[in-house]
Image (tube, rainbow, N blue to C red):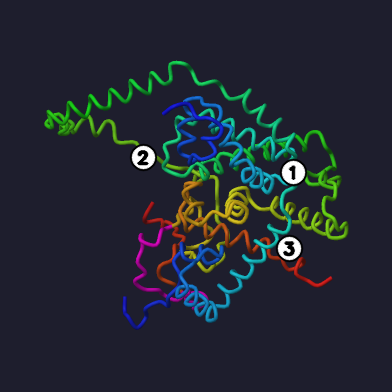
Amino acid sequence: MPNMTTALAQLASDEELANAATRGELPAREELFHRHRGLAYRVAYRLLGNEADALDAVQDGFVKVLTHLAGFQGRSSFRTWLLRVVSNAALDLGRQRARREMVSLDGVGPNQRDEWEPVLLDDPGQGMHRQDLRRQLNAALAKLPPAMRQTFVLYAEADLSYREIAETLGISIGTVMSRLYYARQQLRSLVESWSKPV
Amino acid sequence: MNPAHEPPWRPDPDVWSSYLSGKLTDRAMTQRIERWLEENPAALDEASLDRSLRDLCELTPAPPPSLHEWNVAWQKIQTRVPPTPWWQPVVWFAGLAACVAFFALFRSEPSLLEEKPKPAEAVANHPAPEEVFAVASPDEIQILRVEGSLFSLAVGELPLAGLLELLETHEFTVRSIEPDARDQMVPHVVSGTPMIWAKLVSEE
């Protein structure tokens, strides 16, 4: 296969790109990053509740994936493989961050940095409401055990099916269903407070 | 199992997952699930909760990074990914050639593929290692409480010590269920669902 140009890379499948990227072809690597960075970031953000950390997790995940592309055997799709690596990187980063903050930031919780997030929506009232909701959701997710949080985020944010999650995380589909059941139950109070009319 | 006690129908996990995510295109199956939900308030509640949580996630998307931030991230990734060594394509080619040669050899001499019996002594001294995906070792966890759910059934005396085994649907058959001696409660068992299983002392 000849070297892939940027235009060709945009037309290639993930698996073709992965093969080309294994040979060190830069346009293929770049296209893989461009194609999947948004989803990887959304998953990392939900797991970490912080934009800067989510970007770091995406970087860590892509570095691991691009470094070990030769070991990608195509048993799962590139997307689910990437999501496993990125979500694991996010959980690792979260653990490191928690340790760091326990040592250095007395009294400042991991989600309090969101308080300085700018309002991006046209309607400031609606923007504040969403910002507040997002913060509450992040806080509720942070309380879930890591494995349960990872399962829920892959389901709700990455839109993976039960089976895809089972394959991605190497667990049984029954365990996926069980984790999701308990995650939903633990997030129930958040939904109920959100649904109440103001 | 007695057909009179045939458990009621419920969607299998793949279908249920597709239904919850709105990807189920089979109209007849969708209607069947909706009829099933009408008769199963717990499942209806879970479906409704799932929908609300998905809506909540959709309503509160992650603030997207700017193009500049993405560019910086990509630059950092490139500097951290080691370049592909010049000899890697040579290795791939050599590997491919070796595979072709290997298959050509064994095609012409199929007897080479026959497995030679291993000496019994060698097998006894070197049993095949079992690959265990350990989440936690038995002495690291103690199960104090197991809540029933739509998809699981806890069996055994609490507290449980040891690994929490989760059986797939094809790994067990419910033959009979005895009422609990203390409260005479009988679990409502649905066939075709996974179950949590605890080892009895006699199975240790």
Q: Where does residue A174 sit, x and y in percent of width and height?
A: 47, 58
Under circle 1, the secondary element is loop
Between A113 and A142, the residue placed more toward the observer is A113
Residue indicated by mark 1? A50
Judge the density around disc 1: few (<14), some (14-19), many (≥20) Cα neighbours within 10 Å: many
Residue at x 87%, y 60% (from the top left corner) = A125
Residue at x 67%, y 27% (from the top left corner) = B75
Residue at x 15%, y 33% (from the top left corner) = B114
Q: Which residues fall within the magenta stretch? A: B167-188
Mark 3 belongs to which subunit?
A: A
**Is residue B180 on the magenta stretch?**
yes
Mark 1 belongs to which subunit?
A: A
Q: Main secondary structure of the magenta part?
A: loop
Residue indicated by mark 3? A190
Residue indicated by mark 2? B130
Residues under labels 3 and 2: Cα distance?
A: 43 Å
- Vertical arrangement, residue A117 with respect to residue B116, above or below: below
- Vertical arrangement, residue A172 with respect to residue A32, above or below: below
| In this rendering, the label closer to the viewer, 1 or 3 | 1
Residues under labels 2 and 1: Cα distance?
A: 40 Å
Q: In which quarter of the view is residue B168 placed?
A: bottom left
Residue B92 left/right relative to B49? left
Residue A108 left/right relative to A182? right
**Is residue A133 on the magenta stretch?**
no
